[in-house]
Amino acid sequence: MREHHPFLRAISGERDDAGRRILTFEESWYQGRGVYGGVVAGALARALARELGEDDRPLRWLSVHFCAPAVGRGALSVALERRGASVTHASARIDGLDDGETIAFASASFARRRPVELAWRRPTMPAVAPPASIPPFTADPTPTFARHFELRFCHGPAPLSGGEVAEMGAWIRFAEPLLVDVPAALAILDAAPPAAMARFTALRPMATVALACQLFEPLPLADARADDHYLLITRSNVAGDGYTEELDELWSADGRLIALCWQHIALLG
């Protein structure tokens, strides 16, 4: 079954006797003090899709606030805020099972396709070398969760290179092949080193405070395979007062812009 995949197991959870969906935060997905944000966002997105059953309304927007480290176990809950003729708004949260502390909460919008022909796309996919020509990235130390992904850096400065710009790009996929749906795309968007790492020359702890992702392509892509590479571009334009912003772009190998994700990141230590 697909749930045997480590990522699907991490985001799915199980029902308890009270009918709650309970997540167990596995240490193999840790980044620092708890599970990294991609698993948390993916779990929230999957719970929303399961509870709402909006097959004709794909997820268009998801905002997540990370309130506390995801450790131990957490209880997922979903609330329908409004279902209109074309758009559904909902919220979801994860609370610590033992202490009730809020781990994360999210708001989401699901919307039908609108038959409007007007379209444009300002970002363009950078011209980069194909993934087969680039060796996988290896470094020590790396976050524990990083072993679940394969990255091949192909654009901008390398991590911790002291580059002049905070911008990086890498071909990325799950180390264990997985067909990329919405939760998996959200996980990929948060899997690369923050763009600020291109400016640094030594490791510095960082943590995402909040993110907001917008999706533009139905997922999985119609022609997708489990071992496909995706291009992830991360860039930051502003840093100050102990925080930095970041915009992430996720592209298919044939040049389709799948998603954009804005992150607000705290520089720790």
Image (cartoon, rainbow, N blue to C red):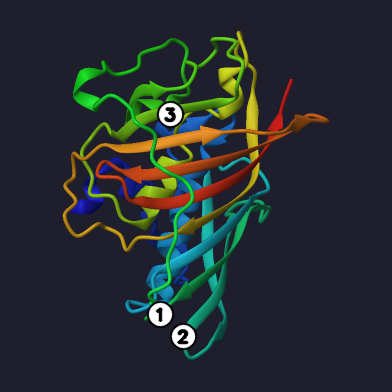
Query: Which amino acid type is shown beneath numbered disc 1?
Result: Arg
Q: How crowded is mark 3: few (under 14 residues within 10 Å), some or many (20 or more)?
A: many
Q: Position of residue 190 (x, y in %)?
A: 48, 39
Mark pair 2, 1: CA separation: 9 Å
| Residue 259 or residue 185, whichever sits in front | 259
Location of residue 173 (image quadrant): top left
Q: In this view, does 43 lie to the left or right of 91?
A: left
Residue 5's place in the image compared with 170, above or below, is below
Q: Earlier in the sequence, mark 3 or mark 2?
A: 2
Q: Which of marks 2 and 1 is in front?
A: 1
- Give the label on residue 114, or none: 1
- On screen, residue 24 versus residue 222, left or right, reads right
Q: Which of marks 2 and 1 is nearer the N terminus?
A: 2
Q: How crowded is mark 1: few (under 14 residues within 10 Å), some or many (20 or more)?
A: few
Per the model, the C-alpha gap separating discs 3 and 2 is: 35 Å
Q: Nearer the viewer, residue 8 or 113?
A: 113
Q: Quadrant of residue 70?
A: top right
The residue at which mark 2 appears reads as: 86
Label count reads 3
From the top left corner, tell me how far across and down residue 87 is, in percent.
50, 81
Can you give x and y, in whole percent of width and height, for residue 111 in the image?
Answer: 45, 76
Amino acid type of the residue tagged 2 in the rendering:
Ser
Q: For the point 66% across and 33% down, which residue is it?
A: 237
Residue, disc 3: 169
